[in-house]
Amino acid sequence: MLKVAMVGWRGMVGSVLMQRMREENDFAHVETVFFSTSNAGGKAPEVPNLGDTKLHDASDIERLKAMDVVLTCQGGDWTNEVFPKLRAAGWKGYWVDAASALRMKDDAVIVLDPLNLHVIRGALERGTRNFVGGNCTVSLMMMALAGLLRENLVEWIAATTYQAASGAGAQNMRELLAQMGAAHASVASLLADPASAILEIDAKVSATMRAESFPTAHFGVPLAGSLVPWIDKDLGDGSSREEWKGDAELN
């Protein structure tokens, strides 16, 4: 039975993965050990074939080396920190990652099994050990358009995406709700008064969202009642890294 390390299982993506693995009874087929970046020594979730009842330190290379598979939703920063150290320590296991850090590496395969199962199987036969989930927008687009692309019926794709706060993770979702709460609290008394002027309400909400005290630690800007017209890194050519993924990963 394979020993699987679970990392980043409490965030938004990890929580959904945990839910699906429980629903599909996946834990019955592996021995699972849970790791944490912030709560090592704490109690591990209850799942079948639990390898240890406590959480292990997600930076413990020696403990990770004992695993056959590392399944991570912890994010790219953790991958960039831990992955090279683990490989340098001689680990030969399978690295399965939801983050983008390794997607474009020559020794990694982007996984979207309804479309490229043959690629995944071929990679396994060749000894590939690194498997990475694709960008969410690209994956959804490919699920819809792969057949048309395969038949060479598509000449050009112009994609416009509007991404939810959940795409940035659990902490950003919490911050959005905190922003919404702060905006409402600033005008709660006015909203309770049917005679209050809507322009006064609008002005107070706007002032609240511009205030230094408004919760923006994770987004950097107010998202409640607004849109952020740019996500990920500036590539310096008028496009963002998120836009670049749509071309580079798809091809």
Image (cartoon, rainbow, N blue to C red):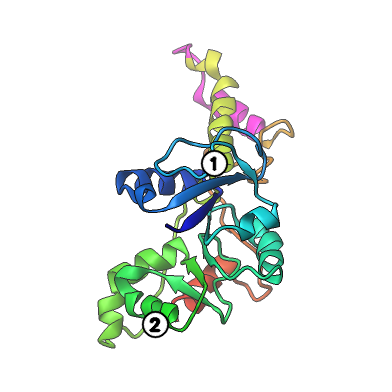
User: Mark 2 belongs to which amino acid?
Assistant: Gly
Q: Position of residue 119 (x, y in %)?
A: 38, 80
Camera sees residue 163: yes
The circle drawn on residue 122 is: 2
Q: For the residues marked 2 and 1, what is the alpha-carbon distance in whole angstroms?
A: 34 Å
Q: Residues within 10 Å of mark 2 (few under 14, many from 20)?
A: few
SS at mark 1 in the image: loop
Magenta residue check for 199: yes
Residue 2 location (% of width, % of height):
45, 58
Residue occupying image coordinates x 62% and y 72% = 238
Which stretch is magenta? 192-209
Placement of the N terminus among the 4 image quadrants: bottom left
Residue 30, x across and y down, in percent: 41, 53
In the image, is residue 82 above or below residue 58?
A: below
Left or right: 154, with 48 as reference point = left
Q: Of the numbered discs in the image, which one, if any, rests on residue 52?
A: 1
Asked whether, in this view, residue 173 is left or right of residue 40, the answer is left
Q: Position of residue 62 (x, y in %)?
A: 69, 56
State whether residue 223 appears in this view: no
